[in-house]
Amino acid sequence: MTAPALSVVVPCFNEQEVLPEFHPRLAAAMDGIGLPWEVVYVNDGSRDGTLALMEALAARDGRVAVLNLSRNFGKEIALTAGLDHAACTDAVIVIDADLQDPPEVIPRLVEAARGGFDVAYAQRSVRHGEGWLKKATAAGFYRVMSRLGGRVQLPRDTGDFRLMSRRALDALLAMREQHRFMKGLFAWVGFPAVAVPYERAPRAAGETKWNWWKLWNLSLEGITSFTVGPLKLATYLGLAVSVVALAYLAQLLFRTAFFGNPVAGYPSLMAVVLFLGGVQMMMLGVIGEYLGRVFNETKARPLYFVERHIPSAAHQQVAQRRAS
Ligand code: UDP
Ligand code: MG
């Protein structure tokens, strides 16, 4: 047995409802490709029977690797942990456990990558089971990101579902920052990439781990870990407000000198003071977001801790051969 050509990395948090359905579908899709493969299931501190299910799968199927993290670290870090432990020689595939990304698309990703691409990312053509508000906010987010992105552009309607060549994976893993907005990191790495359109299914079972607050935070993470655009925004907004205020002041001085000032301008004063106070607080907030991230990065902590690692059989044999 040789090292697997392909590794599939699946981050899982409370996915006991879908895993029993996910694995057979994944195995069927992967077997159709005809290359040796393994799957790395990452248990991201689930509070249900997810880990037991994974271990049962690993006991039955030598192609299954299990990585149990010491607690819940969030999807981005769970994904990184899985990628760190992927044994593949050729390419890695990243997929969600909830069957929103159909495993049947994987052979098409492999096929697309064979055309000489390092990255084949699945691009949603239709989003089933998502309300108009979620679609609209997602669209707004992508628009803001593409404005701020400069030369690193995020592909539209693309999640983490993708294939990466070994060298693209190694490049990605060289970036060890704490604030891991994976879509941004994927894009930053570069390499020739190709889009593979697919229809995104609604979640098969279980519930989404994202609520509006988490999505808002993910967007903030995306913007602040991806670009310093908002810091520039602070500069220009501050500049614009000062210019307007100066013009207003000049006009006021002129009027008072030549025509006198009949009314004490309490309301306008209040308005200006509140406006400037608000702008300043907002800009401090922007700076705070970045400062907080600098703070977290300077601690330079490990990204995660592994409670247990069961490598796939193929990986084990490779490791043994390396050791002897
Ligand atoms: N996930 C994870 N850790 C978390 C939250 C989610 O590993 O803290 C996994 C989850 O099990 C799933 C994937 O990340 O496989 C995507 O999560 P979800 O389906 O809830 O997100 P959505 O598809 O709604 O964006
Ligand atoms: Mg999902």
Image: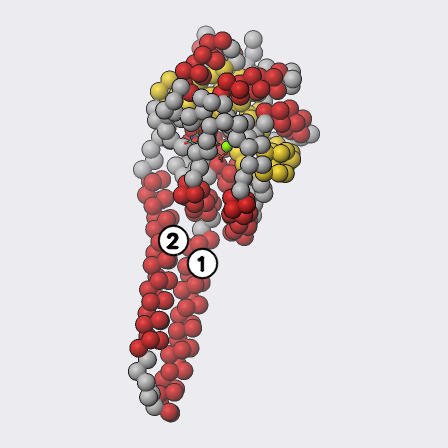
Percent position (x, y) of residue 161? 55, 31
Q: Is mark 1 on a helix, strand or loop?
A: helix
Say which label, 2 or 1, has the lower sequence index.
1
| Res. 297 image quadrant | top left
User: Which one is nearer the viewer's eye here, 197 or 208?
Assistant: 208
- Specify whether residue 302 is in view: yes
Residue 233: which disc?
Answer: 1
Q: Residue furthest right?
A: 115
Percent position (x, y) of residue 289? 37, 49
| Res. 4 image quadrant | top right
Q: Quadrant of the N terminus?
A: top right
Q: Number of labelled discs?
A: 2
Q: Note whether 301 is above or below 63 in the view shown.
A: below
Q: Which amino acid does label 1 sit on?
A: Leu
Q: Name the residue under label 2.
A: 286
Q: Residues within 10 Å of mark 2 (few under 14, many from 20)?
A: some
User: Which one is nearer the viewer's eye here, 57 or 108?
Assistant: 57
Residue shown at the point (37%, 58%) measured from the top left:
283
Q: Note whether 1 is above or below 134 in the view shown.
A: above
| Res. 221 image quadrant | top left
Side (left or right) of 270 relative to 123: left
